[in-house]
Amino acid sequence: MSTDNDTTNESNSCKAPDSDGEVAEEIAVIAFERKMEAAEEIVEGIGDRYESIEILEYHGDVFEEHWGEYDCFIGLMASGIAMRKTAPLLDDKWDDPAICVVDEELTWAIPITGGHHGANQVADDLASMGAVPAMTTASEAADKQGVEKQAKALDAHVVNGDSTVATNLAVLDDELGPVERLDGPKAVLVGDDVTVLKRNEGGIVLGTGSVSGARKEQFLAAWERALEEADREWMDVEFVATGTRKEEEEGLLGAAAEKGLGVISLSKEDLERFEGPTPSRSKELIGWPGISEASAIAAGRDHELLVEKLSHEDSVTVAVGR
């Protein structure tokens, strides 16, 4: 059984060091015959989030036969079975498919390998069906955003995969700081402990500010209005950008998660370089430029403002950049 949601598009799969980090688009659910009903339930529940999803019946060589064909395997089985059958096949984390196991009752979703290359993403999606994602990658365990996750939020990919060991250690020690932007044409010389992110082909950015405690519904409504003003649709949105002082707003994060959008936060210094045209009270009161316009301009590929700041219910402001 399979679903194919876009057979004409190239997959953003993670098959090389020049990789999209956490993105997994082509999925295979491997299940014993007696668990096919649960496998079909998974396809029904999360299948529309991927480019394609197929069900493969388990036999002893099923992983080996299909190794390299999918970005992530969902093993509907005991973790020990998946571990024993895939361990001899593992070679390199940037090339190997991700593996996430789940029990028949959909109680636990456990990434085994490739957490930052699809397995964590799949576990998060299975959480929408009631499973508890049991993630053990260090950045997730510490509730911090590793560089692969930052790449996903930026709609970018990691060019030099080996560097992420050093940079993710810096994330854990709170030493990495915000992602630096360098607009070319330029030549860049970096060391082994510098992770280079390259933006994918993209669309628009929703620069967003808010009062503290703004609700998820207010963010969604504000974004809808901004998209109407820009004559764009949700599929055109690359990610949401905001300032570091707003990066923990639960309403913003909840709204972004509902729409499957990444969120990046920019420092005051970054925003000051791209201040927008609309006067902002925050500039007078706390010295910050208007977050919505500055973040939309700063995070956009072309640093252009498509829609100036719109205010929704005096709670959320949105600007659209590209």
Image: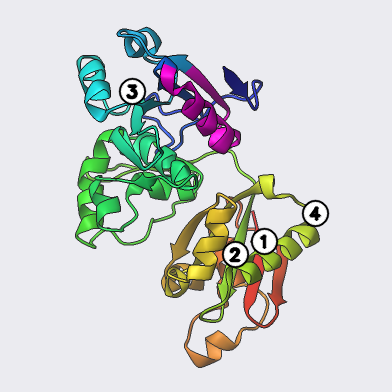
Residue 295 lies in magenta, yes or no? Answer: no
C-alpha distance separating marks 3 and 1: 36 Å
Q: Residue at x 63, y 75 (%)?
A: 316
Q: Earlier in the sequence, mark 3 or mark 2?
A: 3
| Residue type at tag 3 | Asp
Foreground of the two, 227 or 97: 97
Q: Earlier in the sequence, mark 2 or mark 1?
A: 2
Image quadrant holding the N terminus, namely top right
Residue 109 appears at what percent x and percent y?
35, 40
C-alpha distance separating marks 4 and 1: 11 Å
Give the residue number, with chain letter if any, for mark 3. 95
Give the residue number, with chain letter if any, for mark 1. 320
Q: Which mark is residue 138?
A: none
Give the residue number, with chain letter if any, for mark 4. 231
Q: Earlier in the sequence, mark 2 or mark 4?
A: 2
Question: Mark 3 Cα within 10 Å, few/some/many (few <14, many 20+)?
Answer: some
| Residue type at tag 2 | Gly
